[in-house]
Amino acid sequence: MATATNTKPNTTSDVKPDVKLTNTESPLTEKATSVAHDAVDALSSKAATAESSVRKGASSSAEALSEKQLIAREKLNECTEKTRAFASENPLATAGIAFAAGMLITSLLRRK
């Protein structure tokens, strides 16, 4: 069974040409597009400024934290050295302090 096909070529009346809208054909759309582009550009500029500010703040905070950490380690080492020196110079007082601290902790744990 043979079927007939329409081999008629497309004519110019069947194909719609690409039409670009101009300002006179859709002024409201063009104005809205322009306003949207301006808003995005302004937001982009503000976001870039904010990002730069946040990055500078984070970098500054990291540096300050690093310095404080170094100072804290030095203080801890200093206190540790002083405690060891005190313990070796006063062994009896050190034993008494350790005993008192143990009794205090034991009494606090028993009060549950």
Image (cartoon, helix red, strand yellow):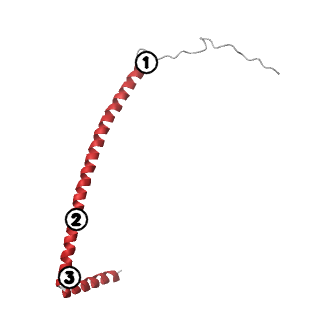
Real-space Cα distance between discs 2 and 3? 22 Å
Q: Where does the C terminus fall, quadrant-wise?
A: bottom left
State whether residue 85 is above or below residue 43: below
Residue at (19% x, 83% y) in the render: 88
Label 2 crowd bin: few (<14), some (14–19), many (20+), radius 10 Å: few
Helix, strand or loop at mark 3:
helix
Q: Residue at x 20, y 66 (%)?
A: 74
Quarter of the view holding residue 89: bottom left
Name, please, the residue furthest toward the top: 12
Which residue has dot 3 on it?
87
Asked whether, in this view, residue 19 is left or right of residue 41, the answer is: right
Residue 72 is marked as 2
Q: Earlier in the sequence, mark 1 or mark 2?
A: 1
Asked whether the residues under the numbered discs 2 and 3 touch, taking CB atoms below 8 Å apart as contact, a structural biologist would say no
| First-in-chain label (2 vs 3) | 2
What residue is rendered at 20% in x and 68% in y? 75
Q: Which mark is residue 26?
A: 1
Task: Name the residue type under label 2.
Answer: Ala
Identify which amino acid the numbered label 1 is placed on.
Answer: Ser
**Residue type, numbered disc 3:** Ala
